[in-house]
Image (spheres, rainbow, N blue to C red):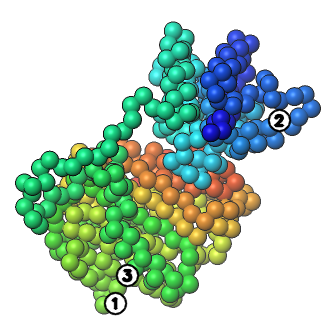
C-alpha cells in the first residue's frame, strides 16, 4: 500500500514552534507517513499560494497545528494561515462530514481551541509535551487507519424470541441522531417518500430552487391526524410570506389531507410562481419542501437575509410544533436544512440597507446541514443555530461570510415580527 500523504498546516509563531512542528513531521515520516512541510518542500522563488493549494489538494489527510496564534490568524484571515483556511473551508463545505482534516492542539490555553471553520471536529491534544509520545501514536493510528479499539461485529438479539409477532418496539434514537442499526433518522423511508412526492409537484411548475426541512424527534410521539393538523395550524408564524406549515382551509385543493400515518398538504400557486409541500407524521416527524421565495422576485438570485429569516422561521416553527404536541422540554430533535438549485445563482440582499457585492456566485448545486437541538433550549440557542445552519450555504458563494452581529440583528428582529 502507498504511504498516506499528509500536509502540515501551522503558523510560524516562533523558532521553537517551527522546530516542534518539524520534529513532528520527522516522526511521521519515520513511521511511514509521507509528510509535506514547507520547511523542506517550499523553496525560494516558489509560489506560496500554489504550494498550499496543491499540498492540501494532494494530501490524504491535513494536520492543522492549532496554536493560539494559528487560531487568531485563521479567524481573522491573516497571512498564509488565513489563505489555507479558505481552501479548507471550501472542502469542508463540499463534504461537511469529511475526515480529511485533523486538528491538533498546541496551546496551553483552557479550554483548548481550534478555529471556528473546523466546526466541532474532534482534536488531538498535544499541549502537554509530557504526553507527546502517546499523542503521536494516537495521531499515527488515525492516519494509518489502525484504531486501538476496533468496532466489534453486530451480534444477534438474545431476546428476539420474547417479542411477540407484530409487536412494535418503537424507534430508539441515540444522541447523535442515529438508530440502533446505524441509520440516520432523517433518512427514514417516510422522509424519502415525501421528497419524491414533493419534487413531482415542484417540477410541474418548472421550478428547481427549493428549501427542504426535515424534523425528527428522538423520542417519538403517538398523535392522531386531528392532533397534528391542530398543532401545525397553531405553530405557523405569519411574519413573512406564506408561513411554513401553512393550513389553507378555504381552498379545497390546498387544505391538509389525512393519511394512514399522518397528514400532508400541497399548495401550488402558478400565479405567484410558488410551491409548498408539507407533511406531519403521527410519531412527530415533519417534512417541508418549499420553492425559493427569490424566484418570485428575481431569477438567479439568492437573498442572504431572506435565507436567514426562513431558517429562523423553521426553528421557531419546530419549537412551536413540538411544544403544541406535548413533547417534553428535554426532547432532542434532529433538524436538517437543504437548499437546492443554487448553481449559478448570485448572492444578494433584498434589503438595500444590507447591501453586499453582487459578485458572489455559487458553482455548487446544493447545501445541506444537519444539527441536533434540545426543545427546551431552542429559544436560547436560536441565533447560534441559525448561523450553524446557514454559514456553509453562504460559503458556497465565493467564501461569503457575515459577522455574528448580522445574524443576531436579523434573527432578533424576526422574533419581534420584523423582516429586515
The residue tagged 1 is 253
Label 2 packing within 10 angstroms: few (<14), some (14-19), many (20+): some
Q: How far is the residue under mark 1 from the one under mark 3?
A: 8 Å
The residue tagged 2 is 48
Q: Percent from the top left, x then y, of residue 284?
A: 25, 63
Q: How far is the residue under mark 2 from the one under mark 3?
A: 54 Å
Mark earlier in primary sequence (1, 3)? 1
| Above or below for 366 versus 147 | below
In the rendered image, the residue lying farthest to the front is: 1
Quarter of image, res 10: top right
* Residue plotted at (52% across, 54% down): 390
Label number found at residue 266: 3
The quadrant of the rendering that contains the N terminus is top right
Mark earlier in primary sequence (2, 3)? 2
Residue depth check, mark 2 versus mark 1: number of the one nearer the observer: 2
Q: Percent from the top left, x then y, of residue 337?
A: 45, 59
| Above or below for 20 versus 407 | above
Label number found at residue 375: none
Q: Front-most of 268 and 189?
A: 189
Residue 409 appears in the rendering? no
Mark earlier in primary sequence (2, 1)? 2
The secondary structure type at the circle numbered 1 is: loop
* Residue plotted at (78% across, 23% down): 39
Amino acid at each position: 500500500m502507498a504511504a498516506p500523504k499528509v500536509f502540515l498546516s501551522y503558523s510560524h509563531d516562533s523558532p521553537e514552534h517551527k522546530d516542534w512542528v518539524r520534529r513532528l513531521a520527522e516522526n511521521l515520516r519515520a513511521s511511514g507517513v509521507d509528510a509535506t512541510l514547507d520547511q523542506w518542500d517550499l523553496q525560494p522563488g516558489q509560489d506560496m499560494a500554489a504550494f498550499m493549494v496543491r499540498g492540501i489538494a494532494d494530501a490524504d489527510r491535513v494536520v492543522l497545528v492549532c496554536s493560539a496564534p494559528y487560531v487568531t490568524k485563521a479567524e481573522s484571515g491573516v497571512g498564509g494561515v488565513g489563505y489555507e483556511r479558505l481552501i479548507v473551508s471550501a472542502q469542508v463545505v463540499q463534504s461537511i462530514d469529511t475526515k480529511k482534516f485533523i486538528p491538533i492542539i498546541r496551546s496551553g490555553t483552557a479550554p483548548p481551541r481550534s478555529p471556528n471553520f473546523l466546526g466541532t471536529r474532534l482534536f488531538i491534544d498535544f499541549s502537554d509535551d509530557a504526553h507527546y509520545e502517546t499523542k503521536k501514536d494516537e495521531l499515527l493510528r488515525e492516519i494509518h487507519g489502525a484504531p486501538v479499539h476496533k468496532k466489534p461485529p453486530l451480534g444477534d438479539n438474545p431476546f428476539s424470541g420474547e417479542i411477540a409477532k407484530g409487536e412494535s418496539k418503537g424507534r430508539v434514537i441515540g444522541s447523535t441522531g442515529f438508530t440502533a442499526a446505524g441509520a440516520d433518522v432523517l433518512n427514514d423511508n417516510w422522509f424519502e417518500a415525501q421528497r419524491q412526492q414533493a419534487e413531482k409537484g415542484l417540477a410541474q411548475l418548472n421550478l428547481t430552487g427549493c428549501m427542504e426541512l426535515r424534523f425528527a424527534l428522538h423520542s417519538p410521539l403517538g398523535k392522531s391526524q386531528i392532533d397534528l393538523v391542530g398543532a401545525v395550524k397553531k405553530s405557523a408564524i405569519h411574519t413573512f410570506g406564506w408561513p411554513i406549515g401553512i393550513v389553507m382551509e378555504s381552498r379545497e385543493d390546498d387544505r391538509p389531507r389525512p393519511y394512514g400515518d399522518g397528514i400532508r398538504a400541497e399548495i401550488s400557486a402558478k400565479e405567484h410562481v410558488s410551491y409548498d409541500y408539507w407533511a406531519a407524521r403521527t410519531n412527530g416527524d415533519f417534512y417541508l419542501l418549499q420553492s425559493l421565495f427569490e424566484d418570485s422576485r428575481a431569477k438567479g438570485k439568492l437573498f442572504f437575509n431572506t435565507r436567514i429569516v426562513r431558517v429562523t422561521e423553521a426553528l421557531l416553527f419546530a419549537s412551536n410544533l413540538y411544544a403544541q404536541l406535548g413533547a417534553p422540554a428535554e426532547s432532542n430533535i434532529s433538524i436538517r436544512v437543504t437548499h437546492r438549485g443554487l448553481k449559478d445563482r448570485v448572492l444578494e440582499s433584498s434589503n438595500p440597507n444590507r447591501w453586499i457585492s453582487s459578485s458572489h456566485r455559487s458553482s455548487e448545486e446544493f447545501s445541506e446541514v444537519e444539527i441536533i437541538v434540545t426543545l427546551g433550549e431552542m429559544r436560547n440557542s436560536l441565533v447560534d443555530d441559525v448561523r450553524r445552519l446557514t454559514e456553509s450555504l453562504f460559503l458556497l458563494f465565493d467564501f461569503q461570510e457575515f459577522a455574528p452581529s448580522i445574524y443576531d440583528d436579523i434573527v432578533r428582529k424576526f422574533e419581534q415580527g420584523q423582516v429586515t
